[in-house]
């Protein structure tokens, strides 16, 4: 458990991210893909069901023993809250109500945020646009680990700890890599979240609040669904920086596994991403792909060639305008 990971730096490249050119080629060849760029009519109902499920769970755990509360937070709440963070991811691309209703999408993301326990949605939106525009961009893409993470989490035991700490690292990394001014929506997100947390505490006590927070920390940490954090962009095959996963966990994660497709067409909702692959299979079927997020986590921990340094990085020029 003490061997150091093999990499001592990121994989630096001097080319633009591949998705922009792929998008142009595919739209020219398959203009029908544009028809997939429409809101997901079922997304709002799926989110409503998940939020109500967690509110019901809050009521059910109010008198539960702590050991069982933590068990259900991992086994059930972790799945639901992780799914909600991925709904927030989809909503950040305006897929709930369409690009013409940006404000509705922002507020709906805050609603989806409620069971997570901490304000997240507005800040995620602010930084996620840079992840797409500057994929792997040095000092711009906060999805890429810091040099400190690469240097410190370099043995199997430490990489296991790194996976468990993902909720904290994803929250703190933007403040170190690319700090931005606090926005009005972030303030509103925080006020709404604190008000709901206080209401739940007033109604049912501390255990439901602890359940929601534990669901987020455990579900976004060392959890099978968290394999997507590593699977999406960590370099398992040299020369490839984005990977898809087509397995059954897509059913509860809004098709986030279709990640190559997502980066090719960020404005297409998760429900339509399988259709992109169906329309243009020659652009996807030959690419490296993952078949199990659990295996991704296992390989990440125990393969010496994999670690936080296993990311493609590039120097990007700041663009003008929106995504």
Image: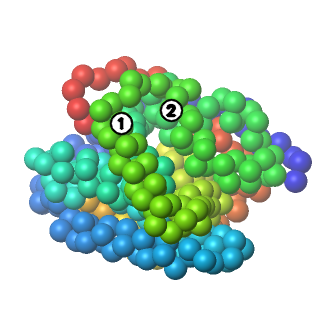
Q: Residue at x 65, y 38 (%)?
A: 309
Asked whether residue 27 is in view, the answer is no
Q: Where's residue 95, x and y in %?
A: 22, 56
Q: Is residue 172 above or below residue 281?
A: above
Q: Which is more toward the observer, 152 or 285? A: 152
**Please, what secondary structure does the residue beneath circle 1 have?**
helix
Question: Residue 19 is drawn in which quadrant?
Answer: top left
**Residue 39: x, y in percent?**
17, 60
Marks 1/2: CA–CA distance: 17 Å
* Residue indicated by mark 2: 174
Residues packed near mark 2 inside 10 Å, few (<14), some (14 to 19) or many (20 plus): many
Q: Helix, strand or loop at disc 2?
A: helix
User: Does residue 135 sit above or below 263 in this rendering?
Assistant: above
Q: What's the residue at 35%, 59% (across, down)? A: 112
Q: Which residue is mark 1?
A: 187
Q: Relative to 293, is 113 above or below?
A: above
Across and down, in percent, residue 34 comes to 14, 55
């Amino acid at each position: 458990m003490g061997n150091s990971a093999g990499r001592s730096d990121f994989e630096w490249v001097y080319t633009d991210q591949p998705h922009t050119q792929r998008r142009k080629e595919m739209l020219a060849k398959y203009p029908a893909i544009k028809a997939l760029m429409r809101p997901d009519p079922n997304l709002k109902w799926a989110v409503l069901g998940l939020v109500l499920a967690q509110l019901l769970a809050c009521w059910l755990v109010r008198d539960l023993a702590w050991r069982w509360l933590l068990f259900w937070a991992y086994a059930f709440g972790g799945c639901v809250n992780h799914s909600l963070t991925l709904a927030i991811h989809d909503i950040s691309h305006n897929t709930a109500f369409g690009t013409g209703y940006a404000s509705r999408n922002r507020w709906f993301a805050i609603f989806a945020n409620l069971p997570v326990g901490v304000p997240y949605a507005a800040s995620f939106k602010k930084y996620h646009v840079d992840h797409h525009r500057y994929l792997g961009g040095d000092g711009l893409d906060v999805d890429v680990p810091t040099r400190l993470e690469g240097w410190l989490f370099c043995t199997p035991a430490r990489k296991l700890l790194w996976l468990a700490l993902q909720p904290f690292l994803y929250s703190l990394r933007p403040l170190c890599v690319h700090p931005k001014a606090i926005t009005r929506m972030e303030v509103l997100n925080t006020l709404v979240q604190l008000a709901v947390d206080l209401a739940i505490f007033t109604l049912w006590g501390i255990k439901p609040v602890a359940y929601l927070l534990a669901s987020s920390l455990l579900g976004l940490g060392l959890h099978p669904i968290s394999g997507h954090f590593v699977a999406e962009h960590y370099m398992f095959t040299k020369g490839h920086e984005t990977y898809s996963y087509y397995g059954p966990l897509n059913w509860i994660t809004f098709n986030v596994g279709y990640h190559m497709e997502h980066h090719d067409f960020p404005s297409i909702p998760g429900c339509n991403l399988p259709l992109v692959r169906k329309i243009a299979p020659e652009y996807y079927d030959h690419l490296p792909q993952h078949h199990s997020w659990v295996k991704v986590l296992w390989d990440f921990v125990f393969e010496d060639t994999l670690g936080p340094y296993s990311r493609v990085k590039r120097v990007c020029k700041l663009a003008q305008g929106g995504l």
